[in-house]
Amino acid sequence: MPGSARPRAALSSHQRQRLEASRRTLAAARVTDLASLNEAALITLVERLRAHLDDAVHLIDETTYMC
């Protein structure tokens, strides 16, 4: 039903920490001036984002199968 609230899975303390770390990394990446970064810094940024995206997918899997 549109507009209805979906139930949320309860996250463990460790899962909440992982989610918060991903949020902080994404927030930092959003404010970074990509044009000012050298090649190595860009690669590092992309790799950090990829790692957090991978962890977010795993977190979704964990919480989906907990229900």
Image (cartoon, helix red, strand yellow):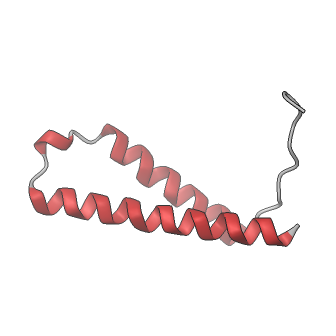
Figure quadrant of residue 43: bottom left
Horizontal relation, residue 12 to residue 29: left or right: right
Give the residue displayed 88% in from the left and 48% down from the top: 7
Figure quadrant of residue 16: bottom right
Give the percent coordinates (x, y) of residue 48: 36, 64
Q: Is residue 42 above or below residue 30?
A: below
Horizontal relation, residue 67 to residue 17: left or right: right
Give the percent coordinates (x, y) of residue 45: 28, 58
Residue at the outermost top position: 3
Q: Is residue 24 above or below residue 33?
A: below
Give the percent coordinates (x, y) of residue 64: 78, 65
Quadrant of the drawing holding the N terminus: top right
Give the residue displayed 43% in from the left and 49% down from the top: 26
Horizontal relation, residue 35 to residue 7: left or right: left
Give the percent coordinates (x, y) of residue 36: 12, 42
Between 41 and 17, the residue placed more toward the observer is 41
Between 6 and 31, the residue placed more toward the observer is 6
Between 3 and 20, the residue placed more toward the observer is 3
Residue 21: tell me if it is visible: yes
Q: Is residue 2 above or below residue 47?
A: above
Residue at the outermost front position: 1
Residue 12: tell me if it is visible: no
